[in-house]
Amino acid sequence: MINPEYMKKIESWFKNYVHQFTSSDRNYNQNIKLKKDHTYRVCEEIIRVGESLNLSHDDLNLAKTIALLHDVGRFIQYDLYQTFDDEKSEDHAELSIKVIRKEGILKGIDKSTNRIIFFAINHHNKAYLSKHEFARPLFFAKLLRDADKLDIFYVITKYYHNKDEHTNKAIELDLLDTPQISDRVYKDLISRKIVKFKYIENLNDLKLLQMAWIYDINFPITFQLIKERKYLEKIREVLPDSDKSQKAYKAVRNYLEVRCNQNKKKVPDS
């Protein structure tokens, strides 16, 4: 369990930790701020999703702690490698775990709670979740993955529609902005599969990968928020007007409509 006092301690630590990453370079500071702001918004999103599931106050505190710490490895990642591309640097979830352990942030928290936090953080960026984990760690991992995707959808759709003002290679992962859509990426999306990053060849492929995240959403409110905020439409608007892009959008949109009508999932007791 994480009480309010310990929650404040973690929040204070996070603020001070991030403050270390400053530079005279404008682009560096912009990308550090990008991840700091992302973290705070994921905290808001995870509370929103958690409240929709009627989580207890203690579980909401746990969820917020997970959200606050989930990307803490991003700062040292960018500091060392000047990229957010895990393939070109290190797995940022694993970096987050290393930072948490090194800083001893969770030393005052019981082992079972630690296990939930570490499992959720370590698996928030993986293509698939392990099916061989206990119910509560899996539940909070799904909660984080939904909250994380909600804000990444916000960040990328805002960026794609305003990128002419300022291109950010860290968001684009240094991918070329060419008009093609790769066959493998397209086929996986149409088949309702999670698109693997290793098949990404350009920025349009990345956009399809992001649209395909809809297949990895877990909770009804997340589907509803994606629909209300028109995230899939906003990505479609910045894709080339082609048969592939139209069919890709139709596939994810149809899936979204079906899932919006499903019943709520319940938080497991153990």
Image (cartoon, rainbow, N blue to C red):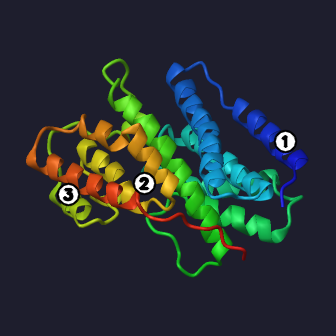
* Disc with the residue nearer the chain's start (3 vs 1): 1
* Disc with the residue nearer the chain's start (1 vs 2): 1
Quarter placement of the N terminus: bottom right
In percent of the image, x 31 and y 59: which residue is there?
255
What amino acid does circle 1 point to? Answer: Lys
In percent of the image, x 59 and y 55: which residue is there?
144
Above or below residue 63? Residue 42 is: above
In this figure, which residue is indicated by the disc labeled 2? 87
* Disc with the residue nearer the chain's start (3 vs 2): 2
Above or below residue 164? Residue 246 is: below
Image quadrant assignment for residue 109: bottom right
Contact (Cβ within 8 Å) of mark 3 with mark 1: no
Q: Residues within 10 Å of mark 2 (few under 14, many from 20)?
A: few
Q: CA distance from mark 3 to mark 1?
A: 45 Å
Residue 169 vs residue 114, the one in the foreground = 114
Task: Check residue 186 in the rendering and tell me which mark sits there, or answer none.
Answer: 3
Residue 112 location, x and y as percent? 79, 71
Above or below residue 135? Residue 31 is: above
What amino acid does circle 2 point to? Answer: Glu
Residue 20 location, x and y as percent? 72, 31
Above or below residue 234? Residue 266 is: below
**Secondary element at tag 2:** helix
Image quadrant assignment for residue 57: bottom right
**Secondary element at tag 1:** helix
Q: In the image, 26: left or right of 229?
A: right
**Secondary element at tag 3:** helix
In this figure, which residue is indicated by the disc labeled 1? 8
Can residue 217 be seen? yes
Task: Check residue 111 in the rendering and tell me which mark sits there, or answer none.
Answer: none
Q: Residues within 10 Å of mark 3 (few under 14, many from 20)?
A: many
